[in-house]
Image (spheres, rainbow, N blue to C red):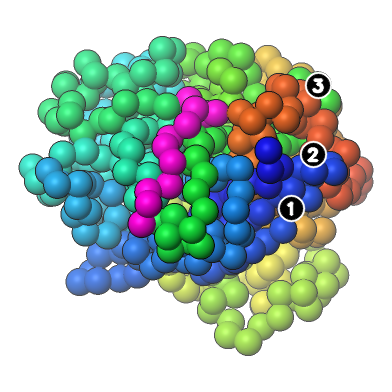
Amino acid sequence: MSRRFAAVDLGASSGRVMLADLSDGLELTEVRRFPNGPIEQAGRLYWNITELYGEIIAGLRGAGPVSSIGVDSWAVDYGLLDESYGLLGNPVHYRDDRTQGVSERVAEQVGAEALYDVSGLQVLPFNTIYQLLADDRLGEAKTMLLIPDLIGYWLTGEVGAEVTNASTTGLLDVRTRSWAFPLIEQLGLPAGLFPPLRQPGEAVGKLRRDVSDVVGGWSAPVMAVGSHDTASAVAAVPASGPAFAYISCGTWSLAGVELPEPVLTPESRAANFTNEAGIDGTVRYLRNVMGLWLLQECLRAWPGSDLGELLKAAAGERPFAAVVNPDEPAFLPPGDMPARIAAECRRTGQEPPASPAAYVRCVLESLALGHRLAVRQAMELSGRDVEVVHLVGGGSRNELLCQLTADACGLPVVAGPGEATALGNVLVQARAAGLVSDLEEMRALVASSQPLRRYEPSGDSQAWAAAAARIL
């Protein structure tokens, strides 16, 4: 049996096809990387899903014959298929404004407490539940497929929904991990939209013959993995015991702890914490923090800027000159992020940053403060002791952010792996192939094979506490 596995990993800013070889340890190679982002048509934001699919096919062609393929992506967004299983237009981007006011109407109809008791999800305006209620194409639709399931359907012809991503919709029962059909009926959504559920490690199906021909004449099964990218990333956290928090840091920062059961208390709901399905029945108890999106949008406003030089300069900027709450709604849509940060600074009585380096310092300190709040609240609300914070994903390569996060949290931060999502993706496939036995062994393999860096907390803890009070 080949020990090569392909991971299709679609992020909200870029996608990649990665090749993992487990012949001697765990070696991960990037086969193809491609940009991803919103496209605007007639005032609406969409994903260019057909272009993404073309890039995936090109990546699989470059990967060559593999034992299996896994697909993961960002959460909540979906494609609608008609009676003949044709796509009803490009999926709408979660940053589109079509869901304005929908969450408030659902809370009035169902009750915020009742809704949280069913799904265990934090209220985010772009959750699938709100997108579907704002979608005027449901009358034409036979089924709804979340992004990884849509790619899986195009690769295999098989329809289904993987449970870790389905848990982000707001329409999955957090206790039973089945579709919450009483809630779906109460909201007036068509029950037939929701396909059968799959578990990580189950086979989706084999490559269709036409796909096999295009990628080079080879075939392989497509396997369900933790198809929500954070589920795969958390599966690859190189932890050696339960006393850890994680931050999966990219466009978004998903910060929390791993638990055996959901936390559905009124305090948890008030703190806007979410209970999402993880690998092997675990619960990803976390909160979304806006993440490196703020920095990405700042860089877009500064054409030609060099991120490496900006980070060096930001390290020398005065600490806490200006900090903002990274989760302010004004920061959610694309746009002139430096201007929005400046406006938020003025609104809160602070002098706006005076240079790009000062803006970068403001963003990274603010993000570290968001990490601090989420980790500390996760510990308090869940009762889980935390001895170390594992920061994985693209943000783990940002040394200044990692050190600031350690300082803010007052805990050691172990940074890496940068490609945690792809690693978790392939390790679920490898386990299905019998090459690793359980989640503990998967994490041990990551810890022994991937470069990691440890950051110890330093600096003035009282200054961090005062800064945290400012953003609240």
Query: Which is nearer the N-term, disc 2 or disc 3?
Result: 3
The nearer-to-camera label among 2 and 3 is 2
User: In the shown orientation, is residue 132 left or right of residue 439?
Assistant: left
The one of 201 and 133 positioned closer to us in this rendering: 201
The one of 235 and 403 positioned closer to us in this rendering: 235
| Tag 3 residue | 241
Q: Magenta segment, which residues?
A: 199-210
Q: Are marks 1 and 3 in contact (CB under 8 Å)?
A: no
For badge 1, the amino acid type reads: Leu
The nearer-to-camera label among 1 and 2 is 1
Residue 450 included in the magenta stretch of the image = no
Q: For mark 2, does the 10 Å Cα neighbourhood hold few (<14), some (14 to 19), or many (20 or more) residues?
A: many
Residue 229 visible within the image: no
What is the residue that sits farthest to the left in this orientation?
A: 139
Residue 462: x %, y % from top left: 83, 41
Q: CA distance from mark 1 to mark 3?
A: 24 Å
Q: Secondary structure at mark 3?
A: loop
| Tag 2 residue | 446
Residue 308 visible within the image: yes
User: In the rendered view of the protein, which quadrant contains the C terminus?
Assistant: top right
Residue depicted at x 78% and y 26%:
441
For badge 2, the amino acid type reads: Val
In this rendering, the answer to whether 132 lies above or below 359 is above
Query: Which is nearer the N-term, disc 1 or disc 2?
Result: 1
